[in-house]
Every structure is written in C-alpha cells, then in structure tokens.
C-alpha cells in the first residue's frame, strides 16, 4: 500500500490507485474531464495536472495517469500545475460557444464548474470559433456538437462499454466529431447514458429539454420499476411532472449506468389519463365514500353469492409495503382467494425460482460483470433485464465466453452489445467446469419451472430474471401465504369479486365477475372496468421497497409531490381559479396506505409502518446503500 | 569517404537484386545466420553505437534489448517509413535507390529479436519506394532469403508492406501500431512501452528505415568499422542528410556522422544560391529549433546538436536566406502541425491552432508585446501534451523566441511584416 502526501495530507491507498483517485479519497477534487471512474484514465484532456515536489517522480504530471507510489509529495496548488490547468480550460474555451444560458447542462456541467473554478474569464484567442453541425440522434437525445470538449468519454462508453458500432469519433485534429456516420436514431439500448457521461452539454435529454435547471429539480434516490434488476436511479421532477431519469451508482447492482427503457420509458407518470381521484361507478368520490362503498359492495356480494367469494390480487410491480399487507386484507375481508400472479405458469415459475434462491448462490449484476463464463438460457435480456446484457459485455471484454442456450435466447441480444456468442441447445453443452466464476442466466418469461429448478440447482451461480420490480417479493409472499394464481381462482367459479392492487389483469379473465375494484396509478384495462377506483401513487411519489430478482431489497424515496402536472392542464384548471393549499390531483395515496385505511375500517389498529415481522429489518434500509439481500447471510456486495 | 547506405546506388535508377547480390549484398545475412546467435547480432548492434534515425536517436541495440526474451506469443518488428515530417525525405531516397539493404536489415533484426513477422509501414505517397520494396520482398522470398527456413538456418521470417492511409501522426510508433491494427491513429500511453506491449499486445520494436538499413553493414564489417565511419570519435556511422531551401545544390547526401554543419552547406551543397546569404535553417526536420550562421561549426551528431540547443532529428535540413521572414516560416510549420494533430489531447488539438492564431496576428501586424509571453507559455506547456507531436511543433517556436525575438518585436512595432516579398499568410487563423 503506497503512502504519499497530497497537499500536506498523508494518504495511503491500494497499489494501482492513481494520484487523482488518491486525492479524491481525502476530499481533494482534481479537475478532470476524460477520466471517469467507469471508463478509467486515458490522459487526453490534460486538465488533471499536479506537481510532484519530491519522491520517485518529479515535475508536472497528469494525476489520472500516475499510479500512486511510496514517498510521492504531490501539490495540487503549485503555480505551474495551476497554470497548466488554467491553460487547458482556456484551450477548451477557444471554440466553446459559451451558450450556458440556453444549454440544458448548465448547472450540472463539469466544464462550467471547472471553468469558473479555474478563474478563466478573459479571452485571448482572437480567431474564429470552429463550428459543427448537429445530428438528429432520435427522439431521446439532443446533440449540440459545438459544446464538445473532446474528452472522448462518449465514444469510449458507446463503443467499449456498450459495444455499439453506430456512434463514435470521426475526423482528426481540431475537427474531431462525435456522432454517427449519418443522422439517425442511436441503436444501442444504452444510448441514454451518453447524457450522463458527457461532461458538458453535447448530449442532453431531449425529453426534458428546456424544462428546468439542476437546482430546480426535485430529486431523490430511486429504483427503476421496469424490470426485476432494480437498477438505481435518480428521477428528476418539477411542477409535479417527472422530467427525466438519471443513473445512480450502485457497484453491486447497475454500476454507473442504466438502460434506455429505465431512462426514457417513464411517460406513464405524467399521463393525463392517470386516475387522480377515487371513483365510484365512473363518478368522482371522496376517499371515505369510496372506501365505505367498497366494503358495502363486498357485503352485498357475500349476501348474494355466499361469504368469501372474493379475490385480493397483488402483482410483481406492487411495492413490498403494499404486498405485505394483502394477506391481512384478504383475511379481514374473509376473501377466500389471495393472488400475486395471474396465470398458473407465471406463478409456478416465480415461486420455483424464489424457493431456490438461497445462500450466496445467486448472481448479482456485479457477479455477472466479474464472471469468466456466461450462459443465457431461454431468455432475451433485452426484454427481461437489459442491464444484465451490459454486465455480460463487461465480462466478455475480459475474456468470458457467452453461450446462448435454447431457442428462446435470440442472437440479437448479443449483437446489440457487440458480443460474439456461441449458440447451443442445452445447458449441459456449456463447459462450466473449466471456469472459475461462471454464471447462468434464465428468465421467468420462457423457462419452464423444471428448467428453472434445474438451473437454480445446477451448482453454477444462477440468476433467474422475474417479471417485475418486486416480483421476488410477491413470489415470497405468495409461497408464504399459499396464494393461488388468479386464473385458477376464477376457473373454480367461486370468484364473484376482484380487488386488483396495481395488478395487470387481462379483461377477458374478469368477464362475468360482478364486482371489480382497482387500486392503481396507471390507467389499465382493470381501472377501465372497475366499479370502484382507488388511485395510488407512482413509485416516484412515495417511499417504498422493491425486492429484485436476486432477492435484494432496495428502498426508493419520494421524488415529488403527487398532483396534476401543470403541463397539459386545460384552461379550466390553469391558471388555478380555486384557492387551495394543495395542488389538484394531490389526494392519491401509496397503495399500502389505501390498504391500511381498509384494514382500519375492518377493525385493525392504524398501520404506521407496513413492514412488520420478518420484514422489519428492511425498515432501516438505506436508500443510498447497496440494499439488503434477503437470502444471504454474508454482507451485501 | 566510405559509403554505407548509398554504396550500391546506381545513378538515375534503382539497384537490381542481382547487382545488390553481386556486390556483396545479403552476405551479412548469410554471415549473421551462420556465424552468430541472435544475441550476438544484438550485441554487434549495441557495440556499434547505432542510434535510431527516426528522430529521437535512441540507441538501437539498447531498444532491442528491452524485448523480453522469454515471453510466450508472437513478437513484432515494424519498419517505420511514414516519413511525413516536412523537410525530411531521406527514407524515400534510400528506398528509391536500393530497397534491398532494408530488407536484409529487417531480416537480421528479426533474427536478433526472434520476430517471425515484420511489417513495413509506408507513407501513402511513396509509390515508387513501395513498388521497389514490394519487388525486393518478392525477390528475396524467391531466393530463399525471406520466408520459411531462411538459407536452411531454421529461422523463418515474413515481411508485409502496409501502405498508410496518410497522417503525420501515423509515424509516431504507438499511433502507427493502432493504425496497423485498424484503429484510429491516436498514440497510446507509455508505459507500457512497445518493447513490452505493442502491436496486438505483443513485444514490438519500431525502427526507422535508415536505422535498419545500417544493420547489414554492421553485421558484416563489425562495430569498430561502423564507428570509424563517423567524423568524430564520439559518434558512429554515417547519416543521410536531406537538404532543401536556398542552397545551390539541394539533395540527399550520405555523410559521416559528426560532420560540421558548415561543411555540409559549403562542401556538399555548394554554398548558398547566387545572391543569397544564409540566415537560418531547420537542422533536423520541422520539429527542431533553428540554427543560425553561429552554428556552422556544430558537428552534426545527436549529442553535439542537442548541446547547441536543437536536435539532429531526422537530418532533414531546410535552409533559409535573408529574404525569409522567420515568423512566417514558423507560422507555416505550426500550421502543418495544427492540421496534423491527431485530436486526442487538448494542448495539441487546441493549443496549436491558438499558436497559429497568435503567429498570424503577429505576421499580419496585429500582434502585441503580450503575445510574446503567450507564445512562451505555449512552448512551456505544450511539453505536457500526450505525445511528442506537440512538443515537436514547439521546436521552431522555441527557436524563434530564442534566436529571433527581435524579428518578432519588429513585426509588432511596425505593425506588419518587415520582409517585403516574403511569403505572407493571410488565410484563416486555424489553417482551414
Ligand atoms: C509525431 C511523430 C511522428 C513521427 N514520424 C516518424 C516517421 O515518419 N518515421 C520514423 O521513422 N519515425 C517517426 N517518429 C519517431 C517514431 O515514433 C519512433 O521513435 C521511431 O520510428 C523509432 O525508430 P528509430 O529508433 O529507428 O529512430 C515520429 C514520432 C513522432 C512523435
Ligand atoms: S460529446 Fe461530450 S463526452 Fe463526447 S467527447 Fe464531446 S464533451 Fe466528451
Ligand atoms: S435493466 Fe431493468 S431495472 Fe435496470 S434500468 Fe433497465 S429496465 Fe430498469
Ligand atoms: S500531442 Fe496529443 S493531440 Fe497531438 S498528436 Fe499527440 S496525442 Fe494527438
Ligand atoms: S483527467 Fe487526466 S488527462 Fe483528462
């Protein structure tokens, strides 16, 4: 472990740490553009200059390229080092358009920060600025090449990390250009990360263009709801409208990045058709009326068809807090049926997978990144967990071979990340035995319960992708409480009423069911059919917990106040003519609170904290930590 | 004077394979393979004092000795014939007259290094040289001097010719390797050095054409003979000097290493053109600081030229007479470098166009006294670029500031260029 001194502060770091990273450890941020922790050092921008005053290396050095060594005495404040850094900024500013006021990066721009910090303010270059034309890169990403500082981060991410081939650097000298050969939508399913990784405003989120500054955003640590991987995110909102989603670093899960689905697929939050107030028979109602009405209708139903002819239905997307209260709700309502899944198939696949999750035998995204052999069995990662494909590519870059097993593992998923794959028919053909850290990936969408069981028990570290952000939590509860798949319950002919809690139930299944009630934040076929609608909050409007496919529980925080976005409001609502403290559409509640209100009406004590019993340890879950793995004794990685 | 590199040259045409062989060509290869072990060949080169002719003058044998002997996997030899530095054309002349010495030298170097596959990376425009080389490689292969089991020695070696897509930076050895691998020609960071991790990750030696063409004669005649060719005891061998500019006879000469600069101009170039008086020159290719008439007695070898404040570089000498504006010359040179920057690092990509803009400003009469300090800062800070291109580009600027500051001040004071009739540059500041 080399010991060195940086600005009189003694530092000890593991061998191989660069001086730039060592300085960061003691809180000294050396300016950097081309260095990024996920991309490493390449020494291109030359802004990280420091002066080595004593020790094995002397003189002006680029701190990102310099491994820390014993006895180094580093100065970040030395006049020569500062002069170098000042000049680099001045050079980068020769051609920069200085258009911060109309740049969406303004306020979250590394170039802006370091330019201001370095004190560069007077222009000495008198030549004309170089200009570029921009490209259309699709509906999500705005391109403004004049702002480029040629740090090469984008090209390195896109080609090396994401394996894309339709974007890169062209030209040379001061005309280097970062873009596509021709205008057109970026092909990589991870293209949105360009927005995060570009230190200046070349790539900005087109979907949030000109909407807000960094300091306007409401932000909180969150978790992506789009698949069962649970990538960490930071959604940004303003005026009750979700504007965009950024990746949040979690080394055990998604690393630094997220997929485009997770970043750009969140329009539903702002959907004007979202249920915003309780409804009874299509008419808006108060919460009290709606809850009373629901209980009354259930009573009627029991009178008519016999007690217990009710199904309480959760789902793989319902946050854990709501999911854990469902068994009690079913019990107090006397409902004969509790469901977390719709079809028998889906249900057995999930319960099988979850029943075999144990010990430290499940692969996280990080395990996949560090594996030395990967088999994907009957699973399309692009559908079931895109970020796992990015993890696969990182392992492949280190030499791990990729095997695609079975007819539901399409080659296109490997092509999307620029990885060569070997196609085989059965998992037994993969020579796991000759590798040290192999992983095997399957998915609940195409793998049969038998296959899932075989894979989970194969001895090779497995991961089975599930059908939603809390599918693992739902499957655990389903096993624990003997839930039945809804389709089976309905087939028994005993279901006369269904309460769907953020559940996606096909309309055909409910034909002939006299009472349908829905708690949801999304307009679905269920809310369309429901006699009673109890609107809930989306994940960004509440605190909650998802348990991902590896059994990792992760907490997400409320990002924004629920309410009708200003944008899209008709003249009747905007400007507001009624005077009130709360925004319109604000009365929606997290599903668990709606359930708790029902429980209270049914005689229970008020619930202030839904996670009880064996879930209690999740109460203290740190939303910025790595999460808690439910099935492992070891410390979460 | 004894010639080494030009010994087999025929006036006005290229030597043939048969002539080269009849005159003792490939005898060194026979001798090397038959009498010496690879290590002995390397030792001969070390003892000869041969230094790289590609510009930096790094001792060739020492460079070879950095290649680990025991690493498994292939290792590579690359002959650098990119030669795009303005003022330098020696490798072209060499190959247009005789490609066989290079082929023979490469096989010997490959033998010494345990290389089984060597490349020649040649500048796109060098069509005649490339044709010659292609023919020489074929002829050598057909004669059993190249390919599998050369001359029954058990040693096998192949040579491939790769024609560059054409950028100056491709001559930088690590950018060259990227180009050869089909990547963008950006330099790689060192360490790791090519001798350890180069082409496709294998140990790689990159040598200049002239460097390698010296090897056969060293193997044949021994280090002492080679050293004796130089004009001064501290230097070794001969050097190709390619001269252009306002001299009477501008050509490429093979001369003893360490010959004085004045002798080259007076004895070999026939002095200045009629009516011209020597003002300055670029002594060793476009990246070397100027010489003036004060430097006529400097011996032209690596160490002596370095002591005189410049670099021997490639031996490409460009002579200017008194009608020439040194600001304009420098501007022209830096404009070349700004255009040829690979665009990887900030000081070079943005700093060079800035220097072009400052020099343009001065040349056009818009300069201020502050610009001199600004130029000095660039000379100082461009040393911290990613590769040697940007520091090289500052060579002439450093020379300008050190030797011709008065001339700069004159431009500033009189708001214009004092050299009537001298080339004026009125184009855009960024050279586009
Ligand atoms: C920008 C740049 C351009 C270069 N161009 C050439 C070239 O055209 N030919 C060459 O032999 N060396 C060139 N070099 C030097 C090579 O990097 C390398 O040092 C040389 O080929 C080594 O050969 P030597 O040891 O035989 O001199 C260049 C270096 C730089 C930095
Ligand atoms: S576009 Fe952005 S990330 Fe790419 S090189 Fe330019 S500044 Fe860097
Ligand atoms: S991989 Fe899944 S969890 Fe991760 S960002 Fe994409 S959709 Fe969201
Ligand atoms: S100094 Fe930098 S920009 Fe210039 S050629 Fe070298 S690496 Fe490229
Ligand atoms: S951060 Fe070190 S050179 Fe860019």
Image (cartoon, grey):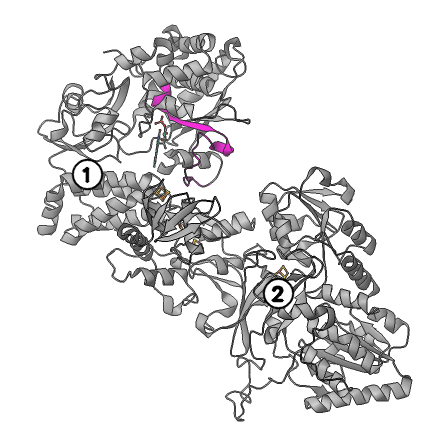
Q: Can residue A212 be seen in this view?
A: yes
SS at mark 1 in the image? helix
Q: Quadrant of the C terminus of chain A?
A: bottom right
Lateral position of residue A608 relative to residue B158, left or right: right
Q: Residue A224 carries which label?
A: 2
Q: From which residue to which does the magenta span run?
A: B184-213
Lateral position of residue B99 relative to residue A376, left or right: left
Looking at the image, which is closer to me, A525 or B294?
B294
Residue lying at 60% horizontally and 56% vertically, measured from the top left:
A252
Query: Circle 1 marks a residue in which chain?
Result: B
Lateral position of residue A126 relative to residue B416, left or right: right
Q: Is mark 1 within 8 Å of ligand 1?
A: no
Residue lying at 54% horizontally and 62% vertically, measured from the top left:
A248
Please tell me whether residue A494 is drawn above or below residue B363 in the rendered image. Answer: below
Decide whether residue B206 is among the magenta residues: yes
* Residue B395: quarter of image: top left
Q: Which mark is residue B399?
A: 1
Which marked residue is nearer to the observer: mark 2 or mark 1?
2
Q: Does the residue labelled 2 lie within 8 Å of ligand 3?
A: yes
The residues bearing labels 2 and 1 have C-alpha atoms spaced at a distance of 60 Å
Q: Percent x, y for residue A453?
A: 80, 53
Q: Percent x, y for residue B177?
A: 45, 34
């Amino acid at each position: 472990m080399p010991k060195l001194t940086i600005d009189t502060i003694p530092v000890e770091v593991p061998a191989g740490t660069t001086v730039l990273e060592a300085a960061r450890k003691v809180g000294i941020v050396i300016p950097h553009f081309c260095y990024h922790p996920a991309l490493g050092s390449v020494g291109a921008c030359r802004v990280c200059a420091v002066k080595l005053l004593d020790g094995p290396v002397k003189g002006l050095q680029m701190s990102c390229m310099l491994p820390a060594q014993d006895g180094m005495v580093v100065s970040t404040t030395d006049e020569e080092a500062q002069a170098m850094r000042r000049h680099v900024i001045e050079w980068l500013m020769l051609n920069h358009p200085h258009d911060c006021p109309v740049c969406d990066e303004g306020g979250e721009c590394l170039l802006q920060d370091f330019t201001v910090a370095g004190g560069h303010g007077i222009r000495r270059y008198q030549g004309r600025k170089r200009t570029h034309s921009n490209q259309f890169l699709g509906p999500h990403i705005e391109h403004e090449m004049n702002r480029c500082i040629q740090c090469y981060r984008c090209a390195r991410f896109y080609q090396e990390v994401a394996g894309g081939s339709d974007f890169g650097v062209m030209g040379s000298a001061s005309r280097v250009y970062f873009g596509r050969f021709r205008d057109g939508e970026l092909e990589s399913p991870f293209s949105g990360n360009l927005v995060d990784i570009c230190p200046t405003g070349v790539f900005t989120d087109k979907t949030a263009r000109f909407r807000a500054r960094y300091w306007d955003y409401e932000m909180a640590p969150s978790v992506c709801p789009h698949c069962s991987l649970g990538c960490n995110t930071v959604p940004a909102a303003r005026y009750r409208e979700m504007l965009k989603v950024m990746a949040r670093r979690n080394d055990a899960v998604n690393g630094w990045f997220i997929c485009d689905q997770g970043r750009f697929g969140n329009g539903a939050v702002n959907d004007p058709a979202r249920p915003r107030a309780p409804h009874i028979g299509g008419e808006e109602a108060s919460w009290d009326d709606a809850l009373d009405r629901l209980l009354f209708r259930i009573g009627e139903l029991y009178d008519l068809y016999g007690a217990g002819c009710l199904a309480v239905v959760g789902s793989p997307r319902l946050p854990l807090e709501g999911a854990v209260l469902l068994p009690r709700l079913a019990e107090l309502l006397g409902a004969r049926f509790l469901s977390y899944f719709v079809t028998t198939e889906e249900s057995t696949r999930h319960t099988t997978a979850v029943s075999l999750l144990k010990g430290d035998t499940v692969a996280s995204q990080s395990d996949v990144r560090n594996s030395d052999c990967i088999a994907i069995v009957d699973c399309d990662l692009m559908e079931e967990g895109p970020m796992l494909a990015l993890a696969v590519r990182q392992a492949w870059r280190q030499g791990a071979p990729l095997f695609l097993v079975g007819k539901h593992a399409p080659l296109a998923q490997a092509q999307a990340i620029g990885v060569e794959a070997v196609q085989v028919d059965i998992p037994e053909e993969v020579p796991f035995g000759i590798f040290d850290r192999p992983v095997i990936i399957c998915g609940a969408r195409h793998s049969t319960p038998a296959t899932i069981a075989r894979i989970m028990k194969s001895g090779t570290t497995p991961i089975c992708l599930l059908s939603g952000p809390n599918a693992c939590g739902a499957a655990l509860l389903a096993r624990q409480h003997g839930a039945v798949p809804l389709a089976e319950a309905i087939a028994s002919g005993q279901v006369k009423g269904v309460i769907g809690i953020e559940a996606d139930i096909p309309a055909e299944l409910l034909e002939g069911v006299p009472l349908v009630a829905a708690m949801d934040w999304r307009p679905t076929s269920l809310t369309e059919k429901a006699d009673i609608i109890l609107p809930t909050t989306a994940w960004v409007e509440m605190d909650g917990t998802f348990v991902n496919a590896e059994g990792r529980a992760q907490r997400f925080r409320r990002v924004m106040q629920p309410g009708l976005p200003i944008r899209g409001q008709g003249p009747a609502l905007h400007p507001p003519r009624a005077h009130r403290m709360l925004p319109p559409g604000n009365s929606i509640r997290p599903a668990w609170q709606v359930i708790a209100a029902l429980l209270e009406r049914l005689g229970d004590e008020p619930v202030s904290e839904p996670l009880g019993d064996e879930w209690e340890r999740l109460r203290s879950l740190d939303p910025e930590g790595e999460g808690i793995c439910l099935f492992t004794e070891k410390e979460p990685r | 004077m004894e010639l080494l590199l030009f010994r087999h040259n025929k006036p006005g045409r290229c030597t043939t394979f048969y002539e080269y062989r009849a005159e003792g060509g490939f005898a060194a290869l026979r001798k090397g393979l038959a009498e010496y072990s690879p290590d002995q060949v390397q030792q001969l080169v070390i003892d000869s004092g041969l230094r790289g002719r590609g510009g930096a003058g790094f001792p060739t044998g020492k460079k070879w000795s950095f290649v680990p002997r025991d690493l498994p996997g292939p290792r590579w030899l690359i002959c650098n014939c990119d030669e795009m530095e303005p003022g330098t054309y020696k490798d072209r002349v060499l190959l247009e007259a005789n490609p066989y010495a290079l082929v023979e030298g490469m096989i010997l170097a490959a033998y010494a290094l345990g290389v089984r596959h060597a490349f020649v990376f040649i500048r796109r425009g060098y069509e005649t040289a490339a044709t010659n080389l292609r023919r020489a490689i074929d002829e050598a292969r057909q004669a059993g001097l190249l390919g599998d089991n050369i001359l029954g020695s058990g040693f096998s070696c192949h040579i491939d010719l790769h024609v560059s897509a054409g950028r100056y930076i491709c001559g930088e050895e690590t950018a060259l390797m990227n180009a050869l691998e089909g990547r963008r020609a950006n330099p790689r960071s060192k360490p790791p050095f090519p001798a350890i991790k180069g082409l496709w990750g294998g140990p790689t030696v990159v040598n200049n054409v002239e460097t390698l063409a010296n090897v056969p004669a060293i193997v044949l005649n021994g280090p002492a003979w080679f050293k004796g060719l130089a004009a001064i005891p501290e230097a070794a061998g001969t050097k190709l000097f390619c001269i252009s500019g306002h001299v009477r006879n501008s050509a490429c000469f093979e001369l003893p290493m360490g010959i004085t600069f004045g002798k080259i101009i007076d004895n070999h170039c026939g002095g200045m053109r009629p009516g011209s008086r020597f003002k300055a020159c670029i002594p060793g290719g476009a990246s070397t600081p100027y010489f003036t008439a004060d430097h006529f007695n400097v011996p032209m070898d690596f160490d002596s030229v370095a002591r005189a404040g410049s670099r021997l570089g490639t031996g490409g000498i460009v002579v200017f007479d008194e009608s020439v504006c040194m600001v304009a010359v420098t501007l022209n040179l830096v404009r070349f470098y700004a255009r040829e920057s690979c665009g990887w690092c900030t000081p070079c990509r943005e700093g060079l166009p800035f220097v072009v803009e400052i020099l343009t400003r001065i040349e056009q009469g818009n300069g201020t006294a502050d610009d001199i300090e600004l130029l000095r800062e660039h000379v100082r800070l461009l040393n911290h670029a990613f590769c040697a291109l940007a520091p090289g580009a500052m060579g002439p600027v450093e020379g300008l500031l050190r030797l011709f500051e008065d001339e700069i001040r004159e431009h500033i004071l009189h708001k214009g260029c004092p050299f009537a009739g001298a080339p004026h540059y009125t184009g855009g500041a960024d050279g586009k």
